[in-house]
Image (cartoon, rainbow, N blue to C red):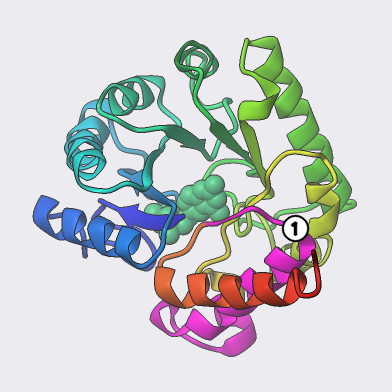
Amino acid sequence: MGVLNVTPDSFSDGGLFVHPEAALRQGVAMAADGAAIVDVGGESTRPGSDPVSVEQEIERVVPIVEALHARVAALVSVDTSKAEVARRALAAGAALVNDVTALRGDPEMAGVVADAGCPVCLMHMLGAPKTMQDDPHYDDVVDEVLGFLEGRLAVAIAAGVHEEQVLLDPGIGFGKTLEHNLLLLRHLDRFVALGRPVVLGASRKRFLGAILDAASDDRLFGTVATTVMGAQAGAAVFRVHDVKPNVEALRVTEAVRTAGDA
Ligand code: HH2
C-alpha cells in the first residue's frame, strides 16, 4: 500500500503532493513500482496535528481518487475517519476505507462501509492525534491493542460489515512510546492470529528515527527492516512511502519463505 498524502502538513511527505498533478504523478509511479493499493489521505494524523473540515478533505481527496482510479489498475483506498469523505471517495472509485479511528470517529462510518460492502481497515489509536503522544500508558500494550481490535471487529460486524472485509492494524506510532511500538512489532504474529489480514504502517515513523537518530527522509532502511519482519510474522499489507524498495524486500522474503514448497 503506497502512501499518498494530499496534505500540506503530513509528517514526512507533507506539501509534496498538494498539487493535483504532483499527487497523480506520485500515485501512478507507486502503482508502477508495484503498489497493489494506493492510499489517499487528505488529513494529517501526525502527533499534534489539527483536524480539517469535511469540505476541505473532500476537495483534496476526491479528485485524486477519481483520477487515480481512471489511471491505475491498483486499488485506491481513502484514508479518512469521516463518513461523508468516505462516501464521496467510494462513489469516485475508491475500493477500500482506511479508518485510523476504527469507526469511532464518525457515527455514520460503519453504515457507509456496510452499505458499500467494501473492505475497511480498523486501526488502533490511543486518544486523538493532537494529544496521543502525551505520555501514553498501557499495562500490557500487546494485550490491550489486541483486545481493542477484537472489540472494534465485533462492532463492525454488528453494524453489518462482513468479517471477511475487515483488515486490522495495531497503529504503530498512534499513542505509543518507542517501547510500545517495538513490542507490537515483536508480537505481530499475535495480531495475525486474530485471523484477519494485518496492515502494518511503520514507514518512516518517529520510532525509527529514535533508534537510528535519523530524520524522516532517512529512515528507508529501517522501514524495510520492519517490512521484512512483518512479512515473516504474516502481515498482509505494508503501508509505505517508498514502494519499490519495500516491494523488492517483500519479493525476496516471500521467495525464501516459500522455498521448497511444492
Ligand atoms: N499511519 C498514518 C496514517 N494512516 N493508516 C493505517 N492503516 N496505518 C497507519 O499506520 C497509518 C495510517 C500516519 O502516517 P502518514 O500518512 O505518513 O502521515 P500523516 O498522518 O502525517 O499524514
| Outermost residue toward the front in this view | 262
* 74 with respect to 137 (left or right): left
Identify the residue at horizontal 73%, vertical 39% (top origin). 196
Identify the residue at horizontal 63%, vertical 51% (top origin). 171
Q: From the viewer's side, name the closer residue of 35 and 106.
A: 35
Q: How far across and how far down the image is residue 150, in percent?
A: 79, 32
Vertical side of 35 occupied by 66: above or below? above
Q: From the viewer's side, name the closer residue of 20 and 95.
A: 95
Q: From the viewer's side, name the closer residue of 131 and 22.
A: 22
* 132 with respect to 12 (left or right): right
Total labels drawn:
1
Q: What residue would you read off at disc 1?
A: 234
Look at the image and tell me whether residue 204 can be seen: no
Q: How far across and how far down the image is residue 120, in percent?
A: 54, 31
* 42 with respect to 213 (left or right): left
Q: Which residues are magenta?
A: 209-238
Q: How far across and how far down the image is residue 143, in percent?
A: 88, 47
Q: Amino acid at mark 1?
A: Gly
Identify the residue at horizontal 45%, vertical 16% (top origin). 116
Asked whether residue 222 is drawn in magenta, I would say yes
Vertical side of 139 occupied by 60: above or below? above
Q: Quadrant of residue 50?
A: top left
Dot 1, crowdedness within 10 Å: few (<14), some or many (≥20)?
some
Magenta region's main secondary structure? helix
Look at the image and tell me whether residue 198 can be seen: yes
Q: From the viewer's side, name the closer residue of 145 and 253.
A: 253
Q: How far across and how far down the image is residue 240, in percent?
A: 47, 63
* 170 with respect to 29 (left or right): right
Secondary element at tag 1: loop
Picture quarter with the C terminus:
bottom right
Q: Quadrant of residue 53?
A: top left
Asked whether residue 66 is drawn in magenta, I would say no
